[in-house]
Image: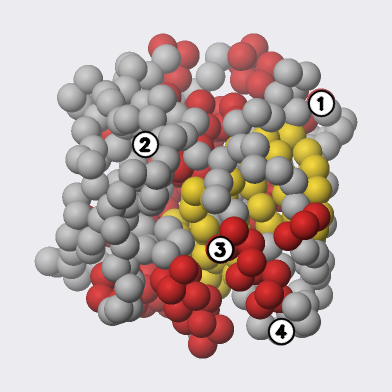
Amino acid sequence: MRMEKGNEGEPYEEWLKSPAGPAKHPRRWTRTAGTHAVPGPRSPGLGGTTQGTAPLSRPAVPPAAFRAGRLPPAAAGMLLTRAGSAAGRALPPLAALCQVLRLERSRRTAIVFPLQKLERYLAPGTDTARFRLFQPGLAALQRAEALFRSDRGHPIDCVSSAVRMDHVPPLALPEVCFIGRSNVGKSSLIRALFSLAPEVEVRVSKTPGHTKKINFFKAGKYFTLVDMPGYGYRAPRDFVEMVEAYLQERRNLKRTFLLIDGVVGLQKTDHIAIEMLEEFGIPYVMVLTKIDRASRGVLLKNVLEIQEFVKESTQGCFPQQFLVSSVEFTGVHLLRCFVAHVTGNLPTVEAS
């Protein structure tokens, strides 16, 4: 599926710069009705469609309040108060788009689209097409953010924790699951995603392997985000049985987010997880965490190595990586938007 560029024909990057803008596995998947369809490495599309995902179309022109790269003080204050009032806590810096839009142009681009920041340091001729496969405009980012912000009519909560499949909630909503090595920063990332719903408690521990159960976070009537136990160090004894059963039996699973430590890159245990996802035919995407801790050279090396690995050795992985920092909120807004898209909650998504 080919994506359209820009707002009313204008590429997003040009709108962003303008004064008016916010300045080789053997198994192959079969494209059949009711199943996930994942394009090959050379596909120009979004990286797979999911059942129930709305068709893509051109976006609406960004709201006038955002055209100067900032919200009016009254509107910004209203959004910040609404997001932080539930638990009486202040909103973390840059957790909301209205905070990001107050930054100067290059800074806000780096926060929302961290891969674009790396492009300038690549050697001439380096293929960067996979850096921009999913590049939503402001309208889509705003709608996605609203799904992660709780209010009276849109509650967000951890609704269940399970150790066996007979304990999991019913198949009611589209689901995405987050999985990764112990100490990859999974709980910290989920807490950052739900930072606009301060009443949602995501426990974060300095001890690797803290998550021992499958935790289900329900975002109103729109989707469920699933936090899986970490693999590797201090993984639960029944980890394999628990995770394999979930991945094979959860028919409403739309995408698996495989978290990779951005400082160390792919590890042996990550390759085992990839083999499992490929074998089961599960569509997934790689998310590089802790990028604030990685030097530019190390991050570039890991990004390019993973990009080459995905191109040559996978069938079910979305070609674009997502880079995130749970501390600086880099990439968090884009990841929210991708979650909203794959769960079918964005009626229009603008991307190049």
Is the N terminus in the top left, top right, bottom left or bottom right quadrant? top left
Q: Which residue is mark 3?
A: 248
Front tag of 4 and 1? 4
Name the disc covering residue 233, or none.
4
Secondary structure, mark 4, is: loop
Front tag of 4 and 2? 4
Mark 3 or mark 1, which has the lower sequence index?
Answer: 1
Is the C terminus in the top left, top right, bottom left or bottom right quadrant? top left
* Amino acid found under the numbered disc labelled 2: Pro
Q: CA distance from mark 4 to mark 2?
A: 36 Å
| Residue 347 locus on image (x, y percent) | 41, 25
Q: CA distance from mark 2 to mark 1?
A: 29 Å
Q: Residue at x 29, y 58 (%)?
A: 30
Tag 2 and tag 3, C-beta contact below 8 Å: no
Q: CA distance from mark 4 to mark 1?
A: 38 Å
Mark 2 or mark 1, which has the lower sequence index?
Answer: 1
Q: Residue at x 78, y 19 (%)?
A: 152
